[in-house]
Image: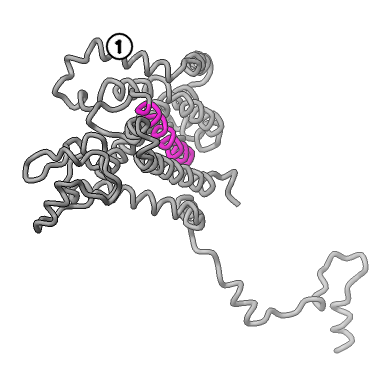
Amino acid sequence: MKDDHSKEFKKHPLSLQIDLSKFTLASDEEKRNLDVMREPSSFWRDGFRNFRKNRMAMVSLIALFAIIIAIVILPAVIPYKYGETIRINGQRDQTVSNLYPMKWSEKEQEYIDNGGKLFPHIMGTDQLGRDYFIRVVVGTRISLIVGFFASLIVLVIGLLYGSVSGFLGGKVDLVMMRIVDVIYSLPDTLMIILLSFVLKETIGKQIQGTIFARMGTGMLSMFIVFGLLYWVSMARLIRGQILSIKENEFVLAANAVGSSKSRVIRKHILPNCISVIIISTALQIPSAIFTESFLSFLGLGVAVPMPSLGSLASEAREGIQIYPFKLIFPAVMISLIVLTLNLIGDGLRDAFDPKLRK
């Protein structure tokens, strides 16, 4: 029987039969390793997991949250107002102008010596005797609000325009893209300057006493230019994504069952572009903040006495040799905000962009 058994499993030289004698049984440890499977995941879970692994992006996100919490809480804690001069016992202090950080004026020191308590001037005061720390905090709030709101305008207009152009295609896409090319060639800074002067002459008196008067015609012109010009890059990006996605099988299947064009865009195409949209919006925010700071530095930003980081830096030019700290504080805040937002945007791109994911 033994010889018959060996002859039964003898392999022919030209046979493709597997030689079982070359295989060994798996050990218990190897079997346990095979049982360990990767937990079910999704696109968003994988993306955020990769984002958390990016240390620079996480540190930047924590720093951004700390800045947002500070600009929300500190104005309610600090007793000074950004547009009011410092007063002692209800009377204006004439000696409180241009104080260095953590210094007191003569009247303030006299008030403290008599047993009074005052909140310190952490960043000193400006030339009009206003606390500089609260002005930097409020200026940071204004700059962030402008950046997020301008990015929202760019996102909405660019998303709608790019979606329609990319999905319809053909002559419609050709005409819409030529309009984008024309808009892209317009000088944005010059448009803001011209609009600022035009709005000041036309609606300057009509908006007196409203929230628009507090913003200023320069800020209004900037938002208008963002709505007119700055969305073209977003529209081009969305159009390119939709052109590559709309030929996929799931889009063809949706069209075959009779889904409307708006439903196909909302339910099938845009969800597959959402990562690119988030990344582009995150990178647009620091660009908008830098634009607002640049325009405020030129005197085309928010109306006085409302501060922004750019207007504070512009005011600091006059006494830069004597009071350099007035320029350092807003410049550091602008750099910090733009740096953190850029690093967060880069982290989102590395985490969610399929072409960059390992």
Residue at the disc numbered 1: 198
- Which residue occupies the extreme bottom position in the image? 1
Q: Is residue 175 left or right of residue 11?
A: left
Give the residue drawn at x 32%, y 20%: 221
Viewer-side residue, 171 vs 88 = 88
Q: Give neighbour class at mark 1: few <14, some 14-19, many 20+ (Cα, 10 Å).
A: some
Indicate yes or no whether the magenta region holds residue 294: yes
**Residue 323 in the image, given as x and y percentages of width and height:** 35, 39
Q: Position of residue 275 (x, y in %)?
A: 47, 42
Q: Does residue 178 sit above or below 6 in this rendering? A: above
Q: Is residue 112 above or below residue 6?
A: above
Residue visible at 30% across and 25% down in the picture: 219
Region rendered in magenta? 275-297
The furthest residue to the right: 13
Instruction: Tell me the quadrant of the picture where the N terminus can be found.
Output: bottom right
Q: Out of 14 and 273, give the one closest to the viewer.
A: 273
